Amino acid sequence: MRKLVKRAALSLLKSAGLFRAFENSRWRRGGVAILCYHGISLADEHEWDPSLYMSPEDFERRLEILKKRRYSVLPLGEAIERIRARDLPPKSVAITFDDGAYDFYCRAWPLLRAYGFPATVYLTTYYSEYNRPVFNTAASYLLWKARGRVLDGAKLGLRKSLDLRTAPSRQSAWLWLLAEAEANGMDAAQKDELLQALAAAAGVDYSVLLRKRLLHIMTPAEVSELAAAGCDIQLHTHRHRTPLDRGLFVREIRDNRERIEAATGAPAIHFCYPCGFYRPEFLPWLNTAGVVSATTCEPALARASSNRLLLPRFVDHANLSPVEFEAGISGFTLALRR
């Protein structure tokens, strides 16, 4: 009910011209709305986790709004340079995708090209080379597919059964599963075997999941193809983690950069914190690693006063209605948060 009231109120404010006033204001012109996306569904992923996935139809509606409202969609690198120069066009936006999932290649990129919009993909590279479903997300997805049940842990080679009867119990089961894999030192192949067992228990044909490339990262060949077509590929760590040890942190950037630059032939100098997690000590480490900018998931416009290694983004997802999206990119809701 609260969300319905909020959406109704935003619709009234939009009708009254408030969004237009904000998007054309001097305050809005001084900043860029850096949009953050994760996945565009190949199947039912947006039903499983609407905070991460959006249907292709909903994503195209976002692009249509940007086109209809005449937003200036800039490449990320250009947007950052023009922030510094205080030379932004009206209603500036940049589009970014985290992780580099296959669904970007298959679903998002064709739509972006059709609308003529540039985009940056922050690519994590371990599962690009080991091209199987990403363990953490695939485990959550398969537990959701088995929702409403209790899975026999013994049949899965686990110490206890998994209660999937409610959303909170599924979350607890997923976190326990991740911790168990970590505690047992499972390598990628062992994790994939566990996913196959989970799929069988959930009644999911794992070979179909593999064939459709659900929850996969793009291959190096696909990354090369996108880069040749004009897509910007940037840093997101090799193993999707930010170690608190300086040497390991810098190694993540180095390993990630080597693979990206080998695939694209272009410099990788922009970074996105995995899961939006950052700490103050990361900033000098990024400087040492030659990183020019880094984005968070903090909601605000990126402005000249923003720390270039802590740039905010507007995280868009399936739980946001079109009017909430418009309120965000116009600067209205971001100004309220401020």
Image: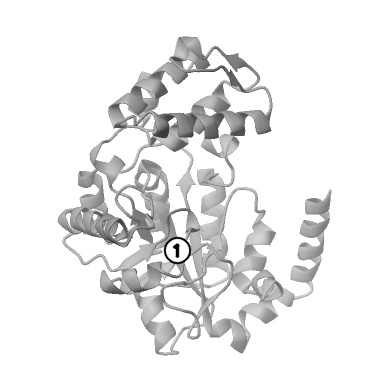
Count the labels in the image. 1
**Coordinates of residue 16 in the picture (x, y in percent):** 79, 74
Query: Which colour assignment does the render follow?
Result: one colour
Q: Is residue 113 above or below residue 40?
A: below
Residue 43 appears in the figure: no
Residue 237 placement, left or right of 65: left
**Coordinates of residue 82 in the picture (x, y in percent):** 40, 84
**Coordinates of residue 258 in the picture (x, y in percent):** 18, 57
Q: Is residue 85 above or below residue 203?
A: below
Q: Residues within 10 Å of mark 1 (few under 14, many from 20)?
A: many
Q: Residue at x 34, y 31 (%)?
A: 185
Residue carrying label 1: 95
The quarter of the rendered structure image containing the C terminus is bottom right
Q: Is residue 78 above or below residue 230?
A: below
Quarter location, residue 144: top right
Q: Residue at x 59, y 67 (%)?
A: 299
Q: Residue at x 46, y 62 (%)?
A: 278
Residue 241 placement, left or right of 11: left
